[in-house]
Image (cartoon, rainbow, N blue to C red):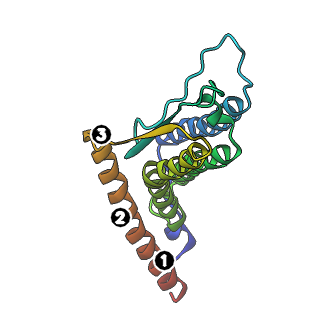
Amino acid sequence: MTEAASAPARPSNSIIWLARVLCWLCWFGIFGAIIATAAASFDLFPKFWEVRRVEGESDLISSSITVNDPTQPGATDQLYHDPIYLLADLVPLALFVWALWSARQVFVGVGHGDYFGRRTVLNLRNFALAVLLRMTVAPLVLLGARAIYLSRFPHGNISLSFSLNGSILLTLAFVGAVAILSTVMAHAARIEDENRQFI
């Protein structure tokens, strides 16, 4: 097999530009999430900004706590400054960054014409796994951090909600299918690479 025959086909200019735009969107999402999380955790936003934490919209499980302690009226809001919770809050951030980084690598591969290469397919699998873990595992980690914080107070309650609406169900089915198919495709690409070495 000649080098020209094994080289990936060059994608069209529209595909190349679309891949570049999506790569920049991934970078924007990565840096935006990191900066926003750091600013919210350390109260770096201006005081006149109304900053609200939005959680659980696309998660299977969402949780919240209420601390009923007259001696500490702001104890509920102090959860977001608790060291254990801040560490737990890094889990969804890390999974979000991993998902966007993997998606960016997919767009880079597509932009280079490596549509079904093993690296592109593996990053597609990583993207699906990161989204799946972000929706399922990350809420449980935050739930554990909330429960630990609440255990320090004699009175308080924690509320749980389980959501499996149509959007969440479709997202779970989609990322699950992508994860399975990309894993099979990566295995096939590895076998093809091994066979190519013997030709």
Kind of residue sitting beneath label 2: Leu
Q: Is residue 37 visible?
A: no
Q: Is residue 199 above or below residue 118?
A: below
Residue 148: x percent and y percent?
59, 49
Write the residue at 67% across / 37% down: 31
Q: Is residue 1 or residue 69 the one in the foreground?
A: 69
Answer whether labels 3 and 2 touch (C-beta < 8 Å).
no
Residue 34: x percent and y percent?
67, 38
Question: Helix or strand or loop: what does disc 3 sit on?
Answer: helix
Viewer-nearest of discs 3 and 2: 3
Disc 3 and disc 1: Cα gap in Å? 34 Å
Local crowd size for mark 2, using a 10 Å CA cut-off: few (<14), some (14–19), many (≥20): some
Write the residue at 35% across / 58% down: 176
Kind of residue sitting beneath label 1: Arg
Answer whether labels 1 and 2 touch (C-beta < 8 Å).
no
Residue 43: x percent and y percent?
72, 26
Q: What number of labels is visible?
A: 3
Q: Is residue 130 or residue 75 the one in the foreground?
A: 75
Question: Helix or strand or loop: what does disc 2 sit on?
Answer: helix
Q: Is residue 94 or residue 123 the one in the foreground?
A: 94
Labels 1 and 2: the sequence-earlier one:
2
Question: Helix or strand or loop: what does disc 1 sit on?
Answer: helix
Labels 3 and 1: the sequence-earlier one:
3
Residue to which mark 3 is pinned? 167
> Which quadrant of the structure image shows residue 166?
top left
Viewer-nearest of discs 3 and 1: 3
Residue to which mark 2 is pinned? 181
Residue to which mark 1 is pinned? 190
